[in-house]
Amino acid sequence: MNNGSFLVAVALVIGLAACDGKKTSETTTSESMESHEASMEKEIAFTVAEKYFMKNDAPNLADPKIETAKEFAKFFGSATVMGEDGKPTAIDFQTQYVIAVTKSATNVDTELSPVSLVSDGEGKLTLSYKVEKGETQSHSMKPILIVIVGKTADGEVTVREVD
């Protein structure tokens, strides 16, 4: 092999190695961006509000986010019962708001349970919940889920039913 052929061969090997390295770099960059986007999603703390019911004459919820006591009172009443844990969960609308999920009246025992509340980092929050159905009852109920969120986690709210 003469010097010219040797140099061409070395240049070819370096060129191929550089192309392969660039491909790996693009893949790594793409994977890094995907994991970065996933890490932007942040769990938000919340408390489930207990001992509330949906009023019979309440209008349909246009927005799941309720920010004032007056607005909350249009839709929900408190279901205080006797005993130590008989009072509804306290909500301080000065520092908190609620996210409410309601379903149509049914005679099937139905429970709505929160799965997660996440922020996408761009001002959008998503409450995921599941529906558990039980036995048929002799009366109707309006299944509800109310979660209390601190106003520091503010944003546009969507709700999503999951399996």
Image (cartoon, grey):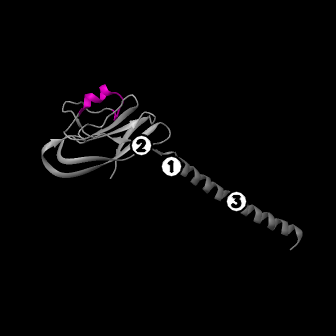
Q: Is residue 41 left or right of residue 1?
A: left
Q: Looking at numbered disc 3 in the image, what kind of residue is underneath it?
A: Cys
Crowding around mark 2 (Cα neighbors within 10 Å: few <14, some 14 to 19, many 20+) is few
**Mark 2, mark 3: which one is toward the viewer?**
2
Q: Is residue 91 left or right of residue 52?
A: right
SS assignment at label 2: loop
Callout 1–callout 3 Cβ contact below 8 Å: no
Mark 1 or mark 2, earlier in chain:
1
Q: Is residue 20 above or below residue 103?
A: below
Mark 1 or mark 3, earlier in chain:
3
**Front residue of 89 and 64:** 89
User: What percent of the width, then of the height, locates residue 62?
Assistant: 31, 32
Crowding around mark 1 (Cα neighbors within 10 Å: few <14, some 14 to 19, many 20+) is few
SS assignment at label 3: helix
The residue furthest front is: 84
State the residue position of label 1.
Answer: 38
Question: What residue range appears in magenta?
Answer: 63-77
User: What percent of the width, then of the height, locates residue 153?
Assistant: 45, 36
